[in-house]
Amino acid sequence: MTNVTEAELLRMVPKELFINGEWVPARDGATLDVVDPATGLVIASIADAGVADGAAALDAAVDAQDSWAATPPRVRGEILRRAFDLMQERKQEFALLMTIEMGKPLAEAYGEVAYGGEFLRWFSEEAVRISGRYGTNPEGTGRMLVSQHPVGPCFLITPWNFPLAMATRKIAPALAAGCTVVVKPASLTPLMTLYFAKLLAEVGLPAGVLNVITTSRSGAVSDPIIADPRLRKLSFTGSTAVGRRMIGQAGQGVLRTSMELGGNAPFIVFADADLDKAIDGAIAAKFRNVGQACTAANRFIVQASVAEEFARRVTERVQDFVVGRGTAEGVNIGPLINAGAVEKASTLVQDALERGARLLTGGDSIEGAGTFFEPTVLAGVAPGSDILREEIFGPVLAIATFDEEDDAVRLANDTEFGLVSYVFTRDLARGQRMVERLQTGMMGLNIGVISNAAAPFGGVKQSGLGREGGPEGIQEYLSTKYTMTPDPFAD
């Protein structure tokens, strides 16, 4: 493991666009600033791509597509495996960079490096498992050959909150399947993707297979790429509002589309739950990544008979949190990504209080440098409160209550979203009923962290389309072809 200072690391990160295997400035010379949310200070100025840069990146991906698709799966897989190995050697660099540009505590950043790296390892193994089938048709008049092929050039748009894992979760299956890609990271946290691209080039990824465009002009740059008939796949992680618009754009070219959109995760605690485990799960599901996760528990739905005890005990845990810059010793809660996130958390808390919720701890922004918000617990949150309908994306734990199982299910499903749910109960049959009744694409049963590279990640309803991770993940980048041949034994 290497050991570098922040200044040394920032000098090591490329500041230009990565197009056709070369680091190049934006054609119009534009740059954008990257800010450390814990200090408000600019940590880097990088190339700000325009429309011409996006077109050049797609040109490079299109030109490299045929040769990359023809590359043996074992070779593609070994490139990904070398990337995994090298990332583990440099995990200190990746973790520190993540904390500097995104703000999460350093311990959590190391966790993301481990998690993000697993997508490289998993899909390095899946590359050689792309398969098909051969057999006689039912009439016996011929042979059916079913084969899988890369869909073609892909446009991958990643969010700011998990800047490494969201990149590897999209890039790794695309490369494993034989697709070339153009990646557009979020302008708030672009450095991680640039540093990852540098690593991929170092382990031998051919020029043009991966292209990275960083930009503050997202719509202007993305729209022509999505509209280009040579593009065959769009993958986006972000808000539902933006995702809906992109689905409409993708429909014009009938693109293969993956969308991982908003969440409003219910966290249900039944009276028979092991409260120690439920509280541990609540802390993990709510405050991981400072609450800035689509999988974060958003609505705590607790059976009335244990609600007071749950609220008291979880509040005691939250009051022990240490808030500060993620690089500092002992910090549990880092900054929110920007001032807008702080304002949103403040507004949601105030609305809940005006509707009768009780503030048990926290509840306000923190004065000084950076964009910090106090870890907060609200109890007795009333139905209709905005905090129960909107994704908080902050360190605010909001508790509502229920009486009967049917009430819990009704409250949990009363949302347009359906990404993930969490349930804590000792009753096995009840747990099985929740698996079948809750309208979400994923569920944590007596556990507060569910993400795994070997599992299909994704939601239902307005939380998205498609799956990332697991055997299902590579299928999003493959198309199926059926070929009929005559009976080879016929006269």
Image: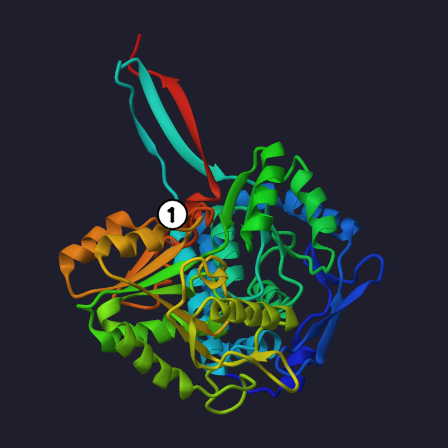
Residue at image coords 35%, 85%: 316
Q: Which residue is mark 1?
A: 472
Report if residue 113 is visible in the image. no
For image coordinates 53% across by 83% down, the residue present is 326
Q: Quadrant of residue 192?
A: bottom right
| Horizontal and vertical percent position of residue 266 | 36, 60
340 shown above or below 324: above
Position of residue 486 relative to residue 105, above or below, is above
With 437 as the anchor, is 390 left or right in this view?
A: right
Amino acid marked by disc 1: Glu
Q: Is residue 405 left or right of residue 485?
A: left
Which residue sits at x=43%, y=86%? 321
Q: Which image quadrant: the C terminus?
A: top left
Tell me if residue 486 can be seen. Answer: yes
Near-viewer residue (446 or 344): 344
Quadrant of the rendered image containing residue 370? bottom right
Judging from the image, what secondary structure is the residue with disc 1 in?
helix
The residue most toward the bottom is 329
Q: What residue occupies the far right of the structure in this picture?
A: 28
